[in-house]
């Protein structure tokens, strides 16, 4: 809701600087002409090399974009992490781990190779792994058609709109699928897949031929970063554990042979595809997608890589940048009449709970009752709740009365370690003055 302007004279809308920043970012890489479009099938070889687009989706569901962010292109290898997530969701980690490993391979994405010891594909981001993962979806007995529909439907839920296939590209790819057919034969000969090589490759190739835009992909990958809830539609698509595992594998094996350098320089779990797309996500923050078809020697989009490098450096988006989550978890400790009120704030996870416990355990309180005020707490995770429960119990055992002021129910379900509950207060003395 907009507030009425209190000042006379004309005023303009206050706009976000982010779209302008993204446009400037595109301008900074636009003239880079190096690299080549993928040429292993005629359909990709004749693709327009010039489109350049970027989209960003926050976990709150806000989308920012610039350039050719609505130009459709096929997912190709970008489908791999999402199909892996779907297999994990449907079959559980044990079954998936019995089919595909999670170590970087250090080999080309379409290498005919398996792990020397296990005879399983090294990871789900190379073709051998992706073909095997595809076979897990919708059960081994599924028809190709049903399996592909389940995959298309998941991708659509992730994008927040109904996605389709690029049929001509798919069939062009199938006409030149000798390499993937060899991989499928190899997988079948080792008992990793049961379908015929033809059906396995058909199913995988259709998965690769699903068409999206950079804008779709930003939302899809932001869903991984948001623990499985699509940020725009609010629909839960995947479980948080599945997303965590998928992002972990993306970070070690998502960028073909350049995964190590990528994590060092960019530090965003990512996946690229031969049609020029590149996706990345920072857990709990955002998803990013770029589109620019010219590829470097490793098969990663040249300008996409540059965009991610710049974004990471300029906007501080490296995963290894320390976020001091718990440091300021105790906002204040206030004496209010009979009570000492410990005002907490922000997100309460392990580190925050640790700093709260430290503050409490290194003080002498003169009041008779200690109250945790969580009005300013945004979220408490499971560990945070357990640790606060155990802390409240220790406070009680140390001889204090305890209480919790939690009108927003952030601590719902909090049970102290001895099975009792902390008394909930209806109000706090002096609260109105503080909030003013
Ligand atoms: N469909 C392509 C293949 O399997 C995807 C390759 C890629 O994007 O890396 O050869």
Image (cartoon, grey):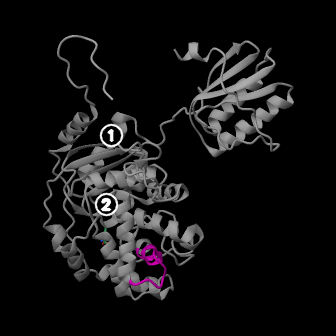
Q: Which residues are magenta?
A: 131-143
Q: Position of residue 346 (x, y in %)?
A: 55, 31
Residue at mark 2: C-beta within 8 A of ligand 1: no
Mark before the other along the chain sequence, 1 or 2: 2
Count of numbered tags:
2
Report crowding for label 1: few under 14, some 14 to 19, many 20 or more residues within 10 A (C-alpha): some
Q: Position of residue 361 (x, y in %)?
A: 77, 25
The residue identified by callout 2 is: 298
Residue at (32, 40) in percent of width and height: 311
Q: Position of residue 63 (x, y in %)?
A: 31, 44
Where is ligand 1, by quadrant? bottom left
Task: Give the answer, above or below, for where 410 lies relative to 10.
Answer: below
Residue 168 falls left or right of residue 358 = left
Do residues under tags 1 and 2 come within 8 Å of each other at their CB atoms? no
Residue 249 falls left or right of residue 69 = right
Does the rendering let one see residue 391? yes
Residue at (78, 21) in percent of width and height: 369
The residue identified by callout 1 is: 311
Camera-side residue: 234 or 167?
234
Task: Give the answer, above or below, for where 101 lies relative to 237.
Answer: below
Q: Residue furthest front?
A: 426
Residue 91 in magenta stretch:
no
Task: Give the answer, above or below, for where 414 lies relative to 291.
Answer: above
Residue at (40, 48) in percent of width and height: 231
Task: Give the answer, above or below, for where 117 lies relative to 323.
Answer: below
**Quarter location, residue 163:** bottom left
Give the SS element for disc 1.
Answer: helix
Quarter the N terminus occupies: top left
Give the SS element for disc 2.
Answer: loop
Residue at (40, 77) in percent of width and height: 147
Q: Position of residue 268 (x, y in %)?
A: 41, 47
Q: Nearer the viewer, mark 1 or mark 2?
A: 1
């Amino acid at each position: 809701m907009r507030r009425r302007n209190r000042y006379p004279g004309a005023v303009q809308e206050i706009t976000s600087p982010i779209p302008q920043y993204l446009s400037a970012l595109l301008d900074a890489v636009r003239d880079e002409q190096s690299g080549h479009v993928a040429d292993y099938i005629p359909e990709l070889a004749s693709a327009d090399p010039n489109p350049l687009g970027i989209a960003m989706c926050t976990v709150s569901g806000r989308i920012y974009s610039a350039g050719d962010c609505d130009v459709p292109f096929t997912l190709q290898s970008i489908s791999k992490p999402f199909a892996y997530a779907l297999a994990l969701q449907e079959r559980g980690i044990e079954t998936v781990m019995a089919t595909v490993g999670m170590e970087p391979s250090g080999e080309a994405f379409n290498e005919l190779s398996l792990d020397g010891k296990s005879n399983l594909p090294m990871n789900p981001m190379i073709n051998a792994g992706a073909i095997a993962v595809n076979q897990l979806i919708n059960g081994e007995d599924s028809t190709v058609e049903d399996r592909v529909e389940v995959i298309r439907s998941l991708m659509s839920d992730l994008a927040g709109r109904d996605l389709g296939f690029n049929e001509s590209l798919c069939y062009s790819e199938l006409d030149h699928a000798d390499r993937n057919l060899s991989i499928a034969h190899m997988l079948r000969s080792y008992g990793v897949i049961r379908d015929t090589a033809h059906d396995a490759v058909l199913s995988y190739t259709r998965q690769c031929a699903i068409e999206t835009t950079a804008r779709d992909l930003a939302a899809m990958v932001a869903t991984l970063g948001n623990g499985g809830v699509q940020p725009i539609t609010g629909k839960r698509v995947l479980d948080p554990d599945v997303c965590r595992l998928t992002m972990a594998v993306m970070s070690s094996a998502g960028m073909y042979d350049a995964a190590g350098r990528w994590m060092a320089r960019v530090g965003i779990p990512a996946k690229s595809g031969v049609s020029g797309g590149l996706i990345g996500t920072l857990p709990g923050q955002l998803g990013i997608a770029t589109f620019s078809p010219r590829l470097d020697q490793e098969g990663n989009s040249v300008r996409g890589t540059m965009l991610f490098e710049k974004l990471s450096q300029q906007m501080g988006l490296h995963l290894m940048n320390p976020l001091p989550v718990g440091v300021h978890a105790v906002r204040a400790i206030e004496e209010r009449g009979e009570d000492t009120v410990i005002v907490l704030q922000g997100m309460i996870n392990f580190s925050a709970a640790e700093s709260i416990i430290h503050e409490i355990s290194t003080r002498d309180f003169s009041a008779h009752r200690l109250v945790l005020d969580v009005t300013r707490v945004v979220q408490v995770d499971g560990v945070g709740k357990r640790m606060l429960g155990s802390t409240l119990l220790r406070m009680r055992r140390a001889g204090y009365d305890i209480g919790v002021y939690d009108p927003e129910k952030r601590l719902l379900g909090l049970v102290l370690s001895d099975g009792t509950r902390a008394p909930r207060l209806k109000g706090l003395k002096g609260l109105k003055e503080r909030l003013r």
